Image (tube, rainbow, N blue to C red):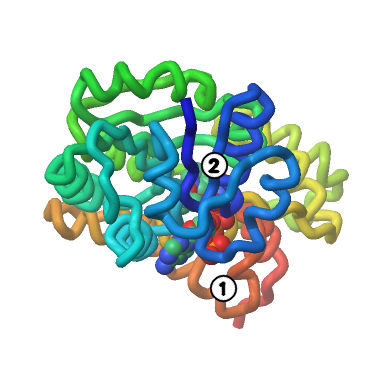
Amino acid sequence: MKIGIAGTGRMGAAIATRLLGLGRAVIVWNRTPQKTQALAATGAAVAATPQELSTNSDIVISMLKDAAAIDATYHGEHGLLAGDVRGKLFIEMSTVRPEVERLLAARAKETGAALIECPVGGTVGPAKEGKLFGFVGGDAADVERARPLLKELCRRVEHVGGIGAGASMKLAINLPLLVYYQALGEALSLCRSVDIEPARLIDIFSDTSGAPNMLKVRGPAIAATLQGKETTPVTFDVNLIRKDLRTMLDEAAGLGVHLPLTAQALKRYDEAAQNGLGASDATMLPVYWLRHERT
Ligand SMILES: NC(=O)c1ccc[n+]([C@@H]2O[C@H](COP(=O)([O-])OP(=O)(O)OC[C@H]3O[C@@H](n4cnc5c(N)ncnc54)[C@H](OP(=O)(O)O)[C@@H]3O)[C@@H](O)[C@H]2O)c1
């Protein structure tokens, strides 16, 4: 079975690396071709267009930035759905609004293909280790067809409903996490006069009810930022977080619900981006808030 991967940014490349490590036949495509070179060197075939990718794959995973990227990659002149894709299975993994996945699944169905969504929890490290959390939406038969592959990528695969349900779950789960980075920055600014080592400070936080699971994993990186170090490599950057928060707010507006904390958090991330942090890792946000002098 040939597995195609459309989008070899940080997450798509990590997923490709995982599958290559398991000995799977992997073919990749990326808008910026240079980002496929390292994968080609470790055994991936490279397609020149999304159409060539889907033509030569049995299952295609797409891991793209946002709705515009999905639109360009699936529906472009040489897009994923441009050729004969009858009988093929697409697994859409990007973090986007449920409506995007629903429309895409309907378009795929018109071409004779099947499409499920599986946005994921977890970042580059878990992706390389096959320890993502998959929030799956789609028809049961298609999900079962995808399950063996998803199990190679995810520590847990949850089929949460029809197409769109996975996107709703993913947006919902990211919400407290993204608000938390800002909350942690504010909490740390109350500790300015507490004179203990950053590593110990973050360790104390992470062992209390003042921390989500994320802090147990990313705590050392955050402690390092408190000592003035940059978090590298960047796995989840501030600009991508702004995209996620905007997506949540758009979705909430569509549902007629209010997310006041989320709206405030977005303003803080926007401000951080204006101050040069857009391409920096999320773990830089709390220390930015702590250090940035306000008038
Ligand atoms: N990073 C994380 O920790 C994380 C975790 C879970 C989920 N996610 C979600 O996973 C998705 C990918 O994230 P990432 O971290 O891999 O982002 P990334 O490194 O910025 O990669 C984005 C990918 O989208 C492609 N892309 C962007 N605009 C495009 C367009 N108009 N046409 C075609 N391709 C386009 C990029 O191609 P180029 O290389 O040509 O720009 C690249 O392959 C996002 O939806 C994100 O919210 C991320």
* Kind of residue sitting beneath label 2: Ile
Q: Residue at x 39, y 62 (%)?
A: 69
Q: For this rendering, which residue is in front, 186 or 92? A: 92
The quarter of the image holding the C terminus is bottom right
Residue identified by numbered label 1: 273
- In this figure, what is the number of numbered marks? 2
The label shown at residue 27 is: 2
Q: Position of residue 221 (x, y in %)?
A: 75, 45
Residue 218 circle label: none
Dot 2, crowdedness within 10 Å: few (<14), some or many (≥20)? many
Q: Is residue 253 left or right of residue 280?
A: left
Give SS at disc 1: helix
**x and y percentages locating residue 82 in the rendered image:** 28, 55
Residue 76 percent coordinates (x, y): 31, 65
**Residue drawn at 29 percent across, 23 percent down:** 143
Is 164 or 20 nearer to us in this picture? 20
Residue at the spot x=65%, y=27% of the render?
129
